[in-house]
Image (cartoon, coloured by chain):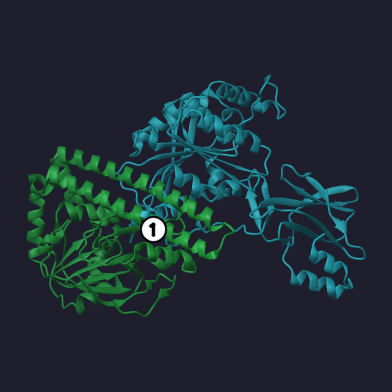
Amino acid sequence: MTSNEQWPQGPIVLLGPQSDYAEIAQVLDNLEVSGTVALITAGWQENEAEDDTLARRMGRPRVNLALHARSEKAFGADADLACAAAARQKHLQHLQEFYRMRLDAVDDVASAIAVRHVDPLELDEQRQISVTQLRHLDADHLARCASVLDDFDATWKPRERQAVTTHSEEIAAVIEGCDAVVIAGGHILALLNRMRLFDVLARVGRRPIVAWSAGAMALTERIVLFHDSPPFGKNLAQVIDPGLGICPGVVVLPDMSRRVQLNKREKIGRFAQRMAPATCIALDPGSRIEFKDGVLQQVKAERLTIAGDVEKEWKP
Amino acid sequence: MSQVIEDFAAGPRTVHSIRAFFRANTFPLVEGGAITFVWRGEAQEVRLRHWVFGLASSQNLARIAKTDVWHLTMPLPPASRVEYKFEIVRDGHGHWIQDPLNPHLARDPFGANSVAHGAGYSVPSWIHRDPESARGTYEVVEFPSAVFGRRKTKIYLPARFRSSRRYPLLIVHDGDDYLNYASLGSILDNLMARREIPDMIVAFTNSPYRIGEYANDERHARFLTDELVPYLESKFPLRAQPQARCLMGASFGAVAALSTAWRRPGFYGRLLLQSGSFAFTDIGEGNKRGPAFDPVVLFMNQLRAKPTAFSERVFVSCGMYESLIYENRSLIPLLESTGMDVRFREARDGHNWENWRDRLREGLSWLYPGTFLMMYE
């Protein structure tokens, strides 16, 4: 992870999905960005380079940092690192799978208790216990993930290896010539792992960052996967990664109105309670939140409350 | 009797009240766990013809006295889906028709049936063509097979197809029927667009003599494994690994998928079997289903005698209202005993294409989970 001293010092704007990239130019105007933009589309994976439409809508020159392509080259040039990174990902996948099994078990027990004919106060107490158990599993899992990531960095020192530093230095030089960094959505882990590999945030300095969907998630300190209608299995949200952490205190939920059944108040309340004290913020189309110096400043987005409401008007 | 029918029968039964009755209701009438079929007209007899195993396949509708309204109430558990027709008997001759009061139809290679939906059933949204889902493309390949002569196979390439990538291969038996009657084309587009399954290449195969070729025929296994797959792997960017090869089929097509995988252990890592005609006997080799099933019984009895882990993940689905539910239920512990990862889904439906259609999302995404939980565009 990026150390605090290297945190970007400029404003950070997080947005909801950008199906037609309509808001980007406006946001960049507001941030008084007139020059070249450093673009990160690594979440698009192999389609990373297909950014013409986005560039046109931004209305500014852009340089795509090509993190996905660079990672392919770096791993191609350093087989040991590639092998170690693949093993790390396999380990993380297993951790995720087993954590998920534990979540399911807690949820099964919670469902079984919920139908017992006992005093409602006792059921309330049991609901609290279930939330506590979920919180414990989440925290434990995130700590384990962080530990795996830290161990990998300590053992393999990827940012000191030639195959990586060549690209990191090029990335730093590109960003140096840009006025802002724009991070698109896509596959959250594909994006996050590449931003981490090249330590991109350490190069940003005072430049503003505009990010949406997976790009926004990557900047927070807890990545939560969620969907109420998976094709099979339970619809339990799951934490997956500690994130880059420059937007603390929030869990962002891109495209929430499409992915979550908003009429399930108890479920929403339980989720908000599970994530507390972080604020759960919906990043739907048109949503916008702004951070400065690691503090949430402005909000135009709904938040989930512990009471199970989706609150439209609120202030940080 | 249906409460709605009871109320109607207790009324004046005038031309006006009959018209009002038909205007006020949709048919068939679904009331909780019961369904009432209604037909209007002159006839000697009116019969319900359906394919629900466990209920008499022909049941007479009763006429409400002094009207030309006929009705029959039967149990229909929630979430059921039943295909049916009416048989109208006039001058001693029966004539099968679709229910003129019910707009829901299910097509199959033999025509179309009316469809009754039990309480809580809804047609899945993911089967419909979604303008936001980019469409895959199709091409037809034809190659000379030493086994079967020239055979054409329709190939689906995903909308995001890149020749530089490698894809899993799904081979579909009765491919044209899956496209025409189970909406498989739009389902693939939708599930891939939503990343519920990964991009994959799909081969839609067909057989001019499926009852023979699909019934545990070594020639079919040879055609698929030694000819079609190598040909496709030479022509398309496929991941040549068992985990990336899936055989799929329904009814006899499921037998073809299962027997081919069994004949080539370790080659096909994924199987999607729908309402398989997995007839077997516990003693002797005679079967009640006719000679077409003889080779199936031989195969199933062999498999049951010595089950082995010839694949890795197997999704099995079957309708509760089909006669094959017993055989399919029996297959599950057998497959599980080998260590293969098995998922079984029963549905309140029959032996038909829409039942198979409705299970495709769960089956395909379980066999090949996509990255949709990771995607936030």
State the image coordinates of residue A306 (x, y, percent, origin top left). 40, 69
Within-10-Å neighbours for mark 1: few <14, some 14–19, many 20+: some
Q: In the picture, which chain is green?
A: A
Q: Chain of mark 1?
A: A
- Residue B10 image-quadrant placement: bottom right
Q: Residue at x 72, y 42 (%)?
A: B53
Residue depicted at 42% across the width and 33% down the height: B269
- Tell me the cyan chain: B
Query: Can the viewer see residue A267?
Result: yes
- Kindly identify which residue carries mark 1: A132
Q: How many marks?
A: 1
Image quadrant holding the C terminus of chain A, namely bottom left
Q: Position of residue A183 (x, y in %)?
A: 23, 63
Quadrant of the image for the N terminus of chain A? bottom left
A75 relative to B257 in the view: left or right: left
Classify mark 1: helix, strand or loop: helix
Question: The residue under label 1 is which amino acid type?
Answer: Thr
User: Horizontal and vertical percent for residue B190?
Assistant: 45, 55
Q: Viewer-proximal residue, A297 or A284? A: A297
Q: Is residue A163 above or below residue B8?
A: above
Going 45% across and 31% down the picture, which residue do you hit? B311
- Residue B264 lies, in percent from the top left, at 45, 25
Task: Specify the farthest residue to the right.
Answer: B66
Outermost residue toward the top?
Answer: B284
Res. B66 image quadrant: bottom right
Q: Is residue A285 above or below residue A184?
A: below
